């Protein structure tokens, strides 16, 4: 009986030690892995997106998946997702840009990957500049843009809103106002009228080509009326 007891005790101890050793390894499951970064051009300037649209997105296709996980590029050029699974992913950019920058990551081996995509926008849009005197109700904005890759700009607009990163569809609603100005050329000065005194506004330029892949945007500026 004593010999049987010793044998059972020995087997139990071996099983416990194996289980303890296995617990030291980090499991490779769960959706807590992350990919993030910023969209930039080759000179290091940010390429702005729009979080409310799918014009400019970063796509991630996991190993064994048939549907991509899409990350919208925000107005400050950033993107990210911290709910990815521990597997291999192919990550690339889709929208009104050209790029050869494709990312292959193994999120089973790395918990978080930061990567800045280098892209060339269909339309390179300068950051707008306040021209002349800013008044209580109006502001003059100097703008400029250049279509690239043999493309032609077919739509140009200025957005001025009390909401950050305004676009063509934001409109106006309870507690916020957006003014849209149609631009007639690739460069010039536009007047925004109907502003409210002592109010902070966000201004940026949006433009499209005939490719049908969405809008390119400038970086935004802020003004406060007198």
Image: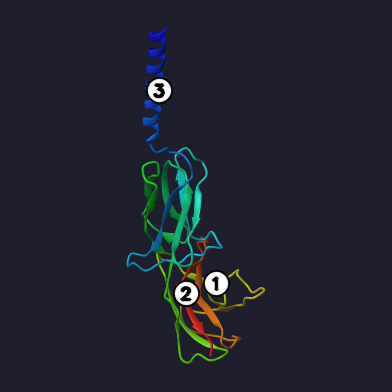
Q: CA distance from mark 2 to mark 3?
A: 63 Å
Q: Is residue 205 above or below residue 25?
A: below
Considering only order in the chain, which callout, 3 or 1, is on the residue closer to the N terminus? Answer: 3
Q: Is residue 46 above or below residue 176?
A: above
Circles 2 and 3 in contact, beta carbons < 8 Å: no
| Residue 114 placement (x, y as % from top left) | 37, 55
Secondary structure type for disc 3: helix
| Residue 66 placement (x, y as % from top left) | 51, 41
Packing grade of label 1 (10 A; few <14, some 14-19, many >=20) is: many
| Residue 57 placement (x, y as % from top left) | 48, 57
Looking at the image, residue 110 sits to the left or right of residue 218; the answer is: left
Q: Is residue 21 above or below residue 83?
A: above
Considering only order in the chain, which callout, 3 or 2, is on the residue closer to the N terminus? Answer: 3
Looking at the image, residue 175 sits to the left or right of residue 50; the answer is: right
Residue beneath the point at 39% across and 38% down: 26
Q: CA distance from mark 1 to mark 2?
A: 9 Å
Mark linked to residue 15 = 3
Relative depth, front residue between 221 and 149 = 221
Q: For marks 2 and 3, give the one nearer the viewer.
A: 3
| Residue 72 placement (x, y as % from top left) | 50, 58
Q: Is residue 48 above or below residue 21?
A: below
Residue beneath the point at 45% across and 59% down: 79
Q: Which residue is mark 2?
A: 220
Mark linked to residue 166 = 1
Circles 1 and 2 in contact, beta carbons < 8 Å: yes
Residue beneath the point at 50% across and 90% down: 134
Considering only order in the chain, which callout, 2 or 1, is on the residue closer to the N terminus? Answer: 1
């Amino acid at each position: 009986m004593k010999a049987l007891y010793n044998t059972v005790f020995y087997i139990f101890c071996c099983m416990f030690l194996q289980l303890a050793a296995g617990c030291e390894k980090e499991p490779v499951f769960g959706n807590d892995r992350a990919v993030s970064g910023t969209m930039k051009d080759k000179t290091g300037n940010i390429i702005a997106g729009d979080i409310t649209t799918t014009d400019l997105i970063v796509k991630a296709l996991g190993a064994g998946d048939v549907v991509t996980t899409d990350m919208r590029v925000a107005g400050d050029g950033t993107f990210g997702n911290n709910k990815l699974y521990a597997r291999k992913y192919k990550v690339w950019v889709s929208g009104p840009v050209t790029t050869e920058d494709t990312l292959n990551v193994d999120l089973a081996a790395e918990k978080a990957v930061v990567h800045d995509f280098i892209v060339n926008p269909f339309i390179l849009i300068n950051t707008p500049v306040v021209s002349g005197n800013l008044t209580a109700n109006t502001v003059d904005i100097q703008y400029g843009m250049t279509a690239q890759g043999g493309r032609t700009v077919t739509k140009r607009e200025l957005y001025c809103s009390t909401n950050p990163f305004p676009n063509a569809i934001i409109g106006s609603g309870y507690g916020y106002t957006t003014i849209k100005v149609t631009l007639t050329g690739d460069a010039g000065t536009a007047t925004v009228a109907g502003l409210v005194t002592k109010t902070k506004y966000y201004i940026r330029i949006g433009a499209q080509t005939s490719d049908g892949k969405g809008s390119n945007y400038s970086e935004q500026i802020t003004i406060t009326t007198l």
